[in-house]
Structures are given as structure tokens and as C-alpha cells.
Image (cartoon, helix red, strand yellow):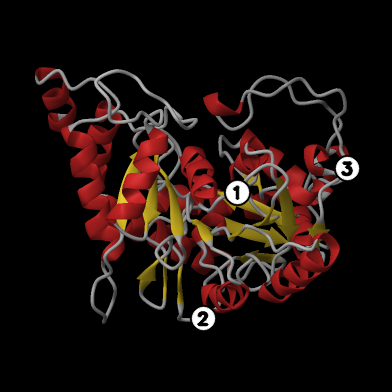
Amino acid sequence: MDFIQEAFDTNWVVPMGPNVNGFERDLEEFVNRREGAEPLHKSVVGLSAGTAAVHLALLACGVQPGDEVIVQSFTFCASSHPITYLGAVPVFVDSERESWNMDPELLEEAIKDRIEKTGRKPKAIVPVALYGMPYQIDRIMEIADRYGIPVIEDAAEGLGSRYKGQVLGTFGKYGVLSFNGNKMITTSGGGALICEDEAAKNGILFFATQARESYPYYQHEHIGYNYRMSNICAGIGRGQMTVINDHIAHHKHVQELYCELLKDVKGVTMHCNPTPDYDSNYWLCAAVIDPEVKVKGQENAYRQVITGAVGGAAGVTHAATCATTDCQPNDNVEAMRVALDAANIEARPLWKPMHRQPVYRNNPAYVNGVSEDLFHKGICLPAGPWVTDDDVRYIVDAIKAAII
């Protein structure tokens, strides 16, 4: 509140200002720290959304209409939609089973096949830190470097997650962060782009502020965007940076408690760090439910079309015409979601893979069945800062009570 009040007192109620500069410095200090190694020297630019960060990173990598960009299929649409904003084509790559993120073997297969089919290599590669879990960044970077393709890390869900002690978003050419209302820290809405250096940051800033040339009047020689972060939102972010480590520690604690309380529940398995190299922030705590698990009411799953809002104020739905689609969670997973909802617990399915979304039905996709299988079986459980130990116990009790 002090940062926000200062913005009003000094009349910095604009998409720039001291809070934005201060928030960027705080983020730079956070992302550049490495465990047991010298700090990095990345620069960070605050933006209006994580989606804007993806868009500008693609633009900076030279993505143009007709180009192809390889992107993880198992993700939220903000990873792929900005590719289409630029008139380019998302090429979807499926996941490996350990991290649930981009499969490096399929990635290389996709690169080779696109070169053979189009005569051109993809313009960028976008791996995603699904639910905060790190991707196999060593292999992905090795492949990307061998083919000379820049990597844009979509770490929107992975703020504070690390791989081998290094913060996600700092391995590739660019790294995307999000501060949406549901993220590890929030500015109510907002995002940031981690850049290689100050020069790269300045290039992003140019396009984020309408691409105005240095004249005393408005001169535009390029198409720009109104993507700069608000000084008010940045004030919220500066306050959030004082508790970011507490938030991350809390999410990890909640994950450990879920694992402990569910360890004897047959057929329900939490998604955990595959090896000690992985250090997820556990932005969301995700579990899979085996198809053999029987849940009360699953015979009535998908009987009614959902009306109203799903997932809070930002998730207002377009009215569906049918209760089912050709790719959806198993009946027992939907029954579990409904049972938890009846107990006043909000749980959600995993992201539906982009290659199974109707809007992308004709896009190239390199799949192995992993993301679809996880989507059929997975569920996300509450993990936010206000989720107490008693809440977790209540949630687990509700899960147990729903199983036949």
C-alpha cells in the first residue's frame, strides 16, 4: 500500500514510473541469483501481461507471417495464441512423462521434419514450465543451439522454479513471467520479459511503448504496442517481492503435505520433481487419478452443460452447446471435481493439450500420447497462500470420501 500510495501522491498514475523501475530491479536481483555460482546479468522489462511478453519475444526473434514456431502442446493458450497474432503457425510438440513438459526427442524430430517439409527451420522454440515444473532445459538448449533456433522460455507459471540452481526463464534468449491474479505473486494483471542484456531490453521497450521515434512529435516507423506495465500495478508487485520467497516456500510445503496425506490412497498420485535437479515452485499441486479408481457419481459425469463462469471472473464461458467434447477428462476425474466442488473446494482439470483444441485442429503436431493421457487423468488441487494445513487435510478427506 505504501508503494501504491506513493504513486498517487507523486501523480505517477501511468504505464511507467518509479514503481515500474523498482519492480524491474527487484526482479532482476531475484532471477539473476544462482545457487553455488556467480550471478547472471539478465535484464527485465515489466509488461501488461505474460501474453504480451510472449508476443514481444516472438517479435524480437523475427517471427513473421508464414513462419513456424515450435511450442509445447501441453499448456495454456497464451503460449500459442501470440504466434497466431503475428500470422505465424504454431507447431505443437508433445510432452515427456517425467516433467510433463516438452519432449526433447520429439522436438528434434519436429525440427527435422519441418525443415524437410518447408525448406526452412522454425523461428523459435517455446517450452513451458507446466504448473511450475522445470523442463529438460539442458537437452532443449543443446538441440536449439545445434540448429541455431532461439528459445523463448514460457516460465509464466514457474516464477522461482529452478533447474540445477538456476531460475527458469534465464537459460534461453528470452524468458516470460506472469503476475496474473492466480500466479506465485501478482500485480493483479501484468507480466515481464527476461532479456539477455540491457540492449535487448531496450529493443523490447521500444515495441512495448508504441514504437515511437525520438522526435519532439509522434513519429512511427514500426508498428508498436501498448504493453508497458502500469506504475500502480508495479507498486503491488514491489510489495509482493517482499513475500515471494514465503509464497514459494508455502507452495512447496502444501505439496509435501498432499504427498504425505495421499501416499496411501491407491490410484491417486501427486506430480513431483523427477530428480534433485528439478526444483518446482509447485504453483499448482497436480495429481493423476488412475482410470480404475471409482468415484461416487461418475455415472452421471458430463450429464449437464455448465453455465455461468468457470475458474473465477477471468473465466466467463461462451455458452457451450454440448456437455461433452471428443477429448475430455475421464468420468472419474470429472466426478471428483464435482464432489470437491460440492465440498466448497475448487479443483480443475489439467490444461487441455493445444493440439486437441478445435482452433488448432489443422496445425502440425508431433505427439506421443503423453499429454492427452495426463489430461484424461489429471486434476489440480488448491495450493495458494491462504491454503492452510487444515485446508489440505479437509481436501484430502474429501478426496478419500469421494472414492468408492
Mark 2: secondary structure:
loop
Side of 327 where 286 appears, left or right = left
Residue under label 2, please give it.
275
Quadrant of the rendering where the C terminus is positioned: bottom right
Residue 63, numbered circle: 1
Residue 63 placement (x, y as % from top left): 60, 48
Marks 3 and 2, the one that precedes in the sequence: 2
Q: Mark 3 points at which residue?
A: 299
Near-viewer residue (361 or 148):
148
CA–CA distance in space, label 3 to label 1: 48 Å
Q: Distance between the residues labelled 3 and 2?
A: 38 Å
Q: In this orientation, does residue 239 appear?
A: no
How far from the left and from the top, in percent, is residue 191? 40, 41
Q: In which quarter of the image is residue 386?
A: top left
- Give the residue at x 81% y 45%: 328
Q: What element carries label 3?
A: helix
From this view, report whether residue 32 is shown above or below residue 321: below
Task: Tell me the distance, in whole angstroms, between the alpha carbons under discs 2 and 1.
Answer: 35 Å
Q: Which amino acid does label 2 sit on?
A: Thr
